[in-house]
Image (cartoon, rainbow, N blue to C red):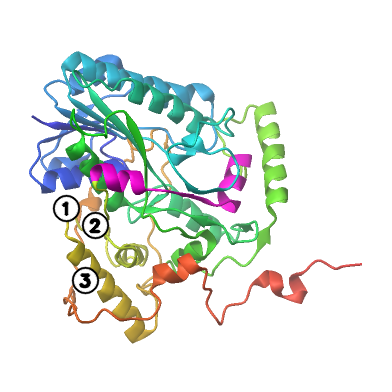
Amino acid sequence: MPVLVTGGGGFLGRAIVRQLVYRGERVRVLGRSPYPFLDKLGVEVVQGDVRDPVAVANACRDVETVFHTAAVAGIWGPWDRYHSINTVGTRNVIDGCLGQGVRKLIYTSSPSVVFNGSDQENVSETEPYPRRYLCHYPHTKALAEQEVLDSNDRTRLLTCALRPHLIWGPGDQHLIPRMLERARLEKLKRVGNGDNKVDMIYVDNAAAAHLQAADALTPDSPVGGQAYFVSEGQPVNLWMWINEILMLAGLPRVRRSVSFTTAYNGGRFLETIYEWFRWLDHEPIMTRFLACQLAHHHYYDVSKARRDFGMRSIVSFEEGMDRLGRFLSGETAIADQTLPCNRSDADVERERQRQINWREQYNKPVATPGRGPSVAKKPEDDEVDDADDGDDGDDDQLYEDADDAHVDDAETESSTSLRDRLADGIEYADEEDENDDPKNRRRKR
């Protein structure tokens, strides 16, 4: 029986599709647009919108497992758009599964469903939903998540919800392109004191977690009806990681900063102005939610996912940064190689060590920018994040490293790795912060 992926043309959805195809599954995708690169993979594409219950029901016909990734992402916009897609659309998927006899539903949620605007450090799934939300996206995703979990029934439909945090990697159409765009315009500023740590997950690891959860979702397993935080399980300093990405793209690091209070109050002011003039289709440069996300700690305890369905990474942080660097430098259209969701720990560690040794040998970043960054443009219509990216098919090129020589297992000793350095907050020794330059400080009376 085929496997259905809603939003299979999106960033996470396409990674899930590739891994399903890799292991020989028949795959069907529900999306609003045709996707030539999916046709090349032999994937059946059903054009439709999750807001249309008939289209959803037709897509669910003769399907055993559904991965529901389609959603509208963002921090600004009208309530009706977010609610109709994220909440009502998910309700349609649940009804479609029940009506067509689907056995498993794996829902892509978000850690923001429990974000209350303050620091969240090593938070577990016992964290309650907040009473108020700072924007519509987490609110509507939380409503949808609760409906998915409440629908779990051992005799009819098994469900679970995954909360991947800060999905990154080559092919991202939102997070990294917007960040680089603001950096090029010299409008990117650090919010807060810059010591906040965040969880993240490479896109292939997020996709693998979905397959791992689906495989473990049985009537007798503890996975049914549960929500899980999904990440690498080792937080890094957010602003140092941002600087690493800027470096890979050949851009200067963030050198200016603004206090959290200033950013938060500025966001509140802009939200008031935009609501007053009904500028709901134009996103403010700052909001209260964004200020909190950029300045606070938010990382999570992933032990429950590791225990219940064996969540594990198939791409190391170092390997992921290498692939992202090659993509940003224009060396390849896309730098992610389709990997099985059960890639061995030995293979992951071997590739990680190869990247560490490469950096040590040449004493330079994982990827050197070539002819300048080549980043996908921000989509004009990003209404449905994981359902309509409008890609042209170049995304199907699989990256293969020409000098991918396996490192000897004996080569295990090395200096502090990139990930450990970011996690420990170790800054470059020769870098100076522009805010520390007396010429850039405010005059004191």
Q: Nearer the viewer, residue 213 or 238?
A: 213
Task: Assign the C terminus to one quadrant of the image.
Answer: bottom right
416 in magenta: no
Pick whichever, 119 or 393, lies toward us. Answer: 119
Q: Alpha carbon of mark 1 to alpha carbon of mark 2: how far? A: 7 Å
Q: Please name the amino acid that badge 1 sits on.
A: Asn
Residue 295 in the magenta stretch? The answer is yes
Q: Say whether residue 57 is left or right of residue 23.
A: right
Residue found at x 87% / y 67%? 444
Mark 2 — residue?
314
Q: Secondary structure at mark 3?
A: helix
**Is label 1 in contact with label 2 (beta carbons under 8 Å)?**
yes
Q: Label 2 sits on what residue type? A: Ile
The region drawn magenta spans 288-309
Q: Choose the circle earlier in sequence order: 1 or 3.
A: 1
Q: Quadrant of residue 189?
A: bottom right
Q: Quadrant of the N terminus?
A: top left
Q: Quadrant of residue 53?
A: top left
For the question of whether residue 51 can be seen, the reply is: no
Q: Label 1, secondary structure: give it.
A: loop
Residue type (three-letter) at the residue carrying disc 3 = Arg
Q: Which residue is mark 1?
A: 342
Magenta: main secondary structure equals helix
- Numbered circle sitting on residue 350: 3
Q: Disc 2 vs disc 3: Cβ atoms closer than 8 Å?
A: no
